[in-house]
Amino acid sequence: MGVIHVEVCAGTHCTMMGAMNIMDAIHSLEELQQEMDNPCDIEVKAVPCMNLCRDEVHGPFVRVEGQLITHAESESVMAAIMDRCK
């Protein structure tokens, strides 16, 4: 299995809406996976504003392997990552 790429919008709006909490949760997931037999490699990075909040959709915005998650929450992002790990 390859690396799972996760991009978290670090624009002002998304940061205020909890994007950094999502990044913390992903890092916690990485730590938990080190104890598993077959951990996934996760590359998470904060990216500049994705310019999506000017539409009617609200953030925070996260992409997991290119799949956009709007109104992202830690649980939904971690579930998307775990789906890719299977």
Image (cartoon, rainbow, N blue to C red):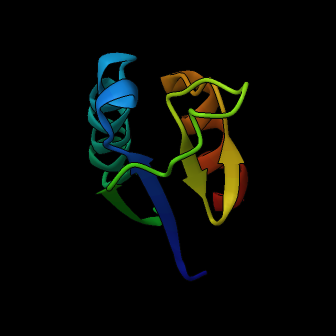
> Is residue 38 visible to the viewer in this orientation of the structure?
no
Residue at x 28% of width, y 43% of height: 27
Residue in the picture at 73% in, 25% down: 56
Q: Quadrant of residue 45?
A: bottom left
Direction from residue 71 to residue 15 in the image, left or right: left
Q: Is residue 53 left or right of residue 11?
A: right
29 in relation to 3, above or below: above
The relative height of residue 75 versus residue 81 in the rendered view (above or below) is above
x and y percentages locating residue 47 in the rendered image: 34, 57
Quadrant containing the N terminus is bottom right
Please give the name of the residue rendered at 46% of the width and 62% of the height, measured from the top-left corner.
39
Q: Quadrant of the C terminus?
A: bottom right
Total tally of numbered discs in the picture: 0
Above-or-below relation of 49 to 2:
above
Front residue of 69 and 33: 69
Q: Is residue 16 left or right of residue 84?
A: left
Q: Can you name the residue that lies furthest to the front here?
A: 54
Residue 51 percent across, percent down from the top left: 51, 48
In this view, 43 is above or below 50? below
